[in-house]
Image (spheres, coloured by chain):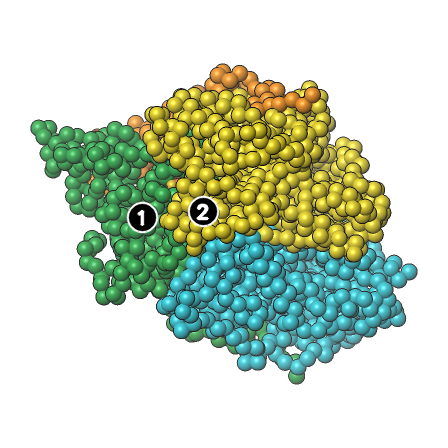
Chain colours: A green, B orange, C cyan, D yellow
Amino acid sequence: MSETNIEIQDLNLTRKDFVPGNEVRWCPGCGDYSVLANMQKTLPVMGVKKENYAFISGIGCSSRFPYYMNTYGFHSIHGRAPAIASGVKLANPELAVWIITGDGDGFSIGGNHMIHALRRNIDMNIMLFNNRIYGLTKGQYSPTSLLGAKTKSSPFGSIDRPFNPSAVALGANATFISRALDVDAKGLQESIKRAQRHKGASFIEVYQNCIIFNDGEFSDVENKATRPDNALFVVHGEPMIFGKEQDKGIIMENHHPKVVQLGDKYSEKDLLVHDETNQIITNLLLEMTFDTSNPTPFGVLRAVEAPTYDEMMIEQIKAVTKIKGEGTLEDLFYSGDVWEVK
Amino acid sequence: MSETNIEIQDLNLTRKDFVPGNEVRWCPGCGDYSVLANMQKTLPVMGVKKENYAFISGIGCSSRFPYYMNTYGFHSIHGRAPAIASGVKLANPELAVWIITGDGDGFSIGGNHMIHALRRNIDMNIMLFNNRIYGLTKGQYSPTSLLGAKTKSSPFGSIDRPFNPSAVALGANATFISRALDVDAKGLQESIKRAQRHKGASFIEVYQNCIIFNDGEFSDVENKATRPDNALFVVHGEPMIFGKEQDKGIIMENHHPKVVQLGDKYSEKDLLVHDETNQIITNLLLEMTFDTSNPTPFGVLRAVEAPTYDEMMIEQIKAVTKIKGEGTLEDLFYSGDVWEVK
Amino acid sequence: MAKKVIRINEATIRFAGDSGDGMQLTGTRFTEATAIVGNDLKTIPNYPSEIRAPLGTLAGVSAFQLMFGSQKVFTPGDLPDTLVAMNPAALKVHLRDLKKGGTILANSNAFTDKNLKMAGWEANPLEDGSLEGYTVFSIEMSKLVGKALENSDLTSKGIERTKNMFALGVLFWMYNRPIEPTEEWLRKKFGKNPSVAEANITAMKTGFNYGETTEIFTTSYAVEKADLPKGKYRNITGNVAVAYGLVAAAKKAGKELFLGSYPITPASEILHTLSTLRNHGVKTFQAEDEIAGIASAIGASYAGDLAVTTTSGPGMALKTEAIGLAIITELPLVIVNVQRGGPSTGMPTKMEQSDLLQAVVGRNSDARIPVLAAKDPADCFECAFEAARIAMKYMTPVILLSDGYLGQGSGPWQIPDPKTLPEIVVNHPSSADAGEDGFMPYARDENETRPWAIPGTPGLEHRIGGLEKENITGMVSQDAANHQLMTDIRARKVDNIKQDIPPSEIHGEPKGKLLVLGWGSTHGAIHVAVDRALAKGQSVSQMHLRWVSPFPSDLEEICNGFDEILIPEVNSGQLALLLKGELARKIHQLNIVRGEPFRASEIEDKINEILG
Amino acid sequence: MAKKVIRINEATIRFAGDSGDGMQLTGTRFTEATAIVGNDLKTIPNYPSEIRAPLGTLAGVSAFQLMFGSQKVFTPGDLPDTLVAMNPAALKVHLRDLKKGGTILANSNAFTDKNLKMAGWEANPLEDGSLEGYTVFSIEMSKLVGKALENSDLTSKGIERTKNMFALGVLFWMYNRPIEPTEEWLRKKFGKNPSVAEANITAMKTGFNYGETTEIFTTSYAVEKADLPKGKYRNITGNVAVAYGLVAAAKKAGKELFLGSYPITPASEILHTLSTLRNHGVKTFQAEDEIAGIASAIGASYAGDLAVTTTSGPGMALKTEAIGLAIITELPLVIVNVQRGGPSTGMPTKMEQSDLLQAVVGRNSDARIPVLAAKDPADCFECAFEAARIAMKYMTPVILLSDGYLGQGSGPWQIPDPKTLPEIVVNHPSSADAGEDGFMPYARDENETRPWAIPGTPGLEHRIGGLEKENITGMVSQDAANHQLMTDIRARKVDNIKQDIPPSEIHGEPKGKLLVLGWGSTHGAIHVAVDRALAKGQSVSQMHLRWVSPFPSDLEEICNGFDEILIPEVNSGQLALLLKGELARKIHQLNIVRGEPFRASEIEDKINEILG
Ligand SMILES: Cc1ncc(C[n+]2csc(CCOP(=O)(O)OP(=O)(O)O)c2C)c(N)n1
Ligand SMILES: Cc1ncc(C[n+]2csc(CCOP(=O)(O)OP(=O)(O)O)c2C)c(N)n1
Ligand code: SF4
Ligand code: SF4
Ligand SMILES: [Mg+2]
Ligand SMILES: [Mg+2]
């Protein structure tokens, strides 16, 4: 479950192969640039042929992503990328399908397709650019904007309680959930690799800064200085440690997460050990998201194995064909009561 | 949080007041009948005037419910009841709004409105009739049908991994989640009362038998003989005990739920105590749902307090009005740069 | 006693009973036997609500009608000659449709006080003379099967349930149909339960013998076999025919078939049928809603499958936005709308033809799309095949309009020889087709069709999407002149399809006084009405549109050959609106919106009214 | 040196620069100053994409145009007289539109090699003579503001950003506009940041003085104030006007206003505006999607609010199914569609009039709905008010069509006196209105309108829904005759609205050779073209439809008074289709689909072509 260091170089692909000729058109300083760069850097080493990547997106700033990847791509309509991608994958299971979406695209209008794609566990990768704002339409609050957010459509502060996207993914029974930060190249690349290798629907939530309409939303973790104290990077099988001095950790107390200071009272072995496969652990990490007394967790929060829809489809076709034989039009047409007029 | 025994009788309403003249048209033997009867029995004692109840539903067998309640009612379109109900509640916050939906209506086509209504915590009650099938359209599998289910649209067995509706609700940050059984009048009434009293969006999942298209789906818990060993009825603050002899209980082991036999090794005080307000506990209960080595939990799985959208809307209107004064058309029209032609 | 056999040309029979009485099955068995005899026929089921209403109520009545004859049969008949009424509610609901002097077969055992009351009869109509003027056979069916099955191991409830087979047996006798096929069918169906099979067979034979033996029946009817074209036939519903047409098109194009759909009455059977065809490589994806249904199909089309989505009115409404995406991305896609009564949820189990304007112009922006409509159940096969062929030939979504009457009704289908079905040639560009400046996803061929490049093909990597694209290169473009160009090309692509539409056939003279112009499932009723008019010597002809967008190129000329045009539609005048626009002339309309098809006589009356 | 002042009747100015250059703001300030002077005017913004493209690129150019005059101004002008180009990209994109001999004001400091290259200029057009034939003022704006603000505490970047105020100052001088209102406005806007305010004011004054002093300018222009009706005015965009119209209607009806909406370009400003009006009791609900937007509004309407939903094309498509629900439940609802270019996502920031057919007939089943369209930004107020009034009077959803050009464009609005706005009388039944057999939710008044019973009213408990309902009682009914009746009533209800439509106004003679018939935002361009034709003595008149469904009752008669009819539309002929159907006669069409409004000259040319 953690062979992310094995890079497959044999296809001789480089970052350049994934950069198309046309200009990238995000606002200067937008967090999307970094995600794009890391995607272009990581895909060449995944052992997948360039022509087998397909990027499917909805509508939003982030959803312009496919135009900037020199692969097959489909910039579709608002919110529907997971449904379109499902068809792409089922029609052509060879493809490595990536869904690119935003907090509005993926969790407002597209929330239903999102949870259904995750539930079905179709082998696709979903990358959510969470900037907690509608960027493309110029700054309305989104379903991930925090209570009180002042935006174009909430001039007196939002009264809409936000989603925690990764928690929604867990509720939908997702088999892979990971969280990354636009400015953290390493974490991004790890998430991209793990997702691409995961069999089933992978969900990556990227915290992304919208410099124009929601600048500084994630400053506590974006800022290099404050990040160590505000971010918890989890690793499967390792204790949950964080802090500039690596001196803080997470324990479970009364079925709640709690930050403790390592030292006299607590040592490393008292800490919770991250287990990607344990739902309670994932849930506990997710509970920390909006809670300012806890750090924000990043990394692979959950990874479990389950049969994928696409495989089961192929298997069912095989199984039925084995029993019934490959169907011909004769079989089909003559399957009812037939009579002849002579 | 648990005054469900206090019944308010002073409005002099009886069950009869809630029974309209027209015929109920579900299939004979359908589980919906019992839910209807318990609703009609419970509402009169809730201290809400009859004319202040509004039942909003989508489309499905279960969604015909409003026609059988002599209250205000709106049998709308497929999947949209939570959105319609949100408008009803915001326009008229006095109303006690009930949303009636099915596993198809509420979690297939209507999944997005469902999670957004729960997230926003609008003070409404959502009752989901989960029969794990599309009844009205004559028996296709639904997003809650189990893998392998043979139905009209899955003649070789469903390959769609199911949702656990209550888990989706938790993922959406719902403040109240409860599960009940069509044949269990007591549990139903308790859920109805608690939901009606809960401030915020309440979610009740009812396991309901569709005698025509999915008979026996819940037989392990519907059957009186096997129920005690297969169902866990949780009560806030009480240990998790079940079994015909009340001799089994639930503990948490390695962050997983586990059934233990009370006796030598374990006593009541080793058991998990149900805590409606604890997310980890709720999550643990939900994890048990599809796991046949565990009993299926019923009762109020989660109940926490959080500000409601409708209240915040009213407060915001008040607050802004306090600062700006009640707006008149003059204010509005003259709010820009004005000049005069004389 | 030798009984009289009267030769008749056609007959219309309606089976009616409680939802639990098995009327659909009884009707279907009668239909199969009739088909095997070689009659032409059409059928239509009629059930009022999706939920099984309480036993014995009016709301619980389910019915099945068929017309069969020794000549071509175009409709399931207007008013039945014979009504089978298994209980008082069935009689109550359907009596008003029975032809004057028609025949009633009733299960008198079901006419209990309780049932009579529930159905709203004051007294027993079988006894109080209120059925005067009809030929009534009041038979104790329950009792008779009870006796016949005294020794079976079925429960009394099980025995009671065979009474529909008794009724069927009587009808078989009455109309001289063979019982053997049904015998065989029952044995197969209840293979695991031979005693049930035998009980049903006994019940059927008892009914047959009852007709043969008892004195209450004096006459039976013979309907000669129809002079149908030579060939193999089977009975088929429109929904199954659509499914088969799509599978056939996929095979002929060397494609896998992908269906993205969400269940909805009366279209669900297409999904059901296709979901049984895994061994034909058919992938059915039951999506979370109609939007995901079409969206997944668009994705599958992009990835190279023959992609289809099926639905009815409210679902069609939800697909509106995504249809626009299919149009602007110029991807092949078949969209099937099995129309039902509306607006909104409306009358889900009833038919209507009222989604025509929605199909032709019902979306944001100038977004033309080819639309064709089937005229009868068997035609659904051809239309589905043609829709798929056109979609792939012109790289365009295509809407196929069926309706609840076609979808659930049936008629004989002359089984085509798979070998002689036209091949569908699909060309996908290969890596070699990428030019020096790279692959051009919006390059155009002689039909202005763009190439269908399949993801996975090296060198053809390209991006498509819902934003306006520059012609040829496919780059995002918000340029004014390009937008005009692309809008014009998209419109021309639809017009180009005219070259695939064969010359229109006219039933009757090619010129004359009145042209009755129809589309979709009105075909049968119009045909019968025009035949009757022709028989009376009236100058009337029939033209029936398969393509409603684009219109066939000979439409205007044909219309010009007639003094008057009449358009009968089961809607408030939708084709008429389009046609008045096209022809800029006055048009007579005949519109009904009752959730049911026309009666031929209604059209006949209108013809008489116009011709004076 | 005394400079020449030339009196002109009208002028068209376009401000163009990088997205970061503040052109929208500059244009708006010029507009306000112009309005205060008393000119009539119209404006239109133009920005190519929603995302801020990289600095200096063609894709990053943002523009704002206005036309103002001493007579009534009907459009924001076809081709500008004066173009402000803040960088080479702006000049590249907009030069082609500039009038022959027009004036260019360029910030020469921005014409660096890098910028020139990025914009695709081979050489510097300000220097290589390629602008011959234009009057070019090449001004070192960046340098000049830098100098003027040498001593300010702003960063050099901050100083550079004031250059748009410099340009504005020059324009103020050139067109003799007062600078004081902008001074005041800047002080207010940067209240917390006085040094920014003062810097901007200094920049503006520097520009003004530059015009006044330097010798490169020899002439300024005066445009007399227009002879507008007496009253108070403000400048307003169509989107804000819609918001105000709805609030006004709510207040006049004694209702709370509920908006259920989802952001979409170019309709979002209605949501933005209404969301600031909490102290007017306005409830804005930003829904999860467009379906929830309209669904929540339907719920709010059921519960007694004046309910509204606002969107643009793709969102309108998604609302299709729910509109059917509003129609069958007969609930009041205003649906605003600010149209944009399509199909699909199409051209989000560009205008089009191409959702007309969708509005009128674009849904499943026969589901008629009243549709009206605004003709200019100020008219959006009246149309929104009227839409709400009709919705509540007739218990029906109403579609109001605006478009990106109206919604984001602006013009002076004569502020109505709130007291003289018509009261809207809404009657809700009370408990006393429940008859002996209970409350009848589908009882009908003289307009066949059903009662609006508010949940919470004792005794009126009732159920509504999307299934067909029995007239009067509102019980679920699948009866054939009732369905026909209800279908007819729903259609008649729309026709009844004709009684609320005042006699149509004709610009020009009421009879003649050619009638130019339009709807929506083409009004201005048609008006100008018809004026020019009239001036030439041609027999041309203009009629402009506010209601497109139902058509006004005098439409046919008026049309009959003309030999020819011309319908110009920014679509492929949608009103023409409806009208040909209605009138059964040939109609001339002029259609453009370029994402931009007509130029009056295009209509003029077409008039000339028809009249020969
Ligand atoms: C059907 C439809 N509704 C609304 C829109 C307008 N719209 C485009 S993108 C967007 C939200 C984008 O937000 P998000 O997904 O968070 O992307 P971001 O721009 O922040 O990356 C909206 C509302 C649309 N294009 N289509
Ligand atoms: C837009 C739309 N799509 C599809 C349908 C058809 N339809 C009606 S109810 C239903 C599913 C009902 O399932 P569920 O919600 O589980 O209700 P149940 O009948 O099982 O109580 C479907 C698919 C519809 N009415 N409208
Ligand atoms: S608006 Fe925000 S999210 Fe969009 S491109 Fe600009 S910075 Fe990025
Ligand atoms: S079909 Fe099933 S769910 Fe529907 S009414 Fe019948 S038994 Fe109940
Ligand atoms: Mg966003
Ligand atoms: Mg169900």
Label 2 environment density (alpha carbons within 10 Å; few <14, some 14–19, many ≥20):
many
Q: Determine the chain carrying the residue at label 1.
A: A
Residue B31 image position (x, y, % from top left): 49, 42
The residue that appears at 55% across and 61% down in the rendered structure is C397
Q: Determine the chain carrying the residue at label 2.
A: D
Q: Is residue D396 visible?
A: yes
Whether label 2 lies within 8 Å of ligand 3 gets the answer: no
Q: Nearer the viewer, residue D183 or B169?
A: D183
Three-letter amino acid code at disc 1?
Answer: Val
Q: What residue is shown with label 1?
A: A35
On screen, residue A192 above or below C373? above
Residue A28 image position (x, y, % from top left): 36, 43
Q: Residue furthest right?
A: C612
Residue D88 numbered tag: 2
Badge 2 element:
helix
Q: Nearer the viewer, residue C3 or C460?
A: C460
User: For this view, does C211 lie left or right of residue D125?
Assistant: right
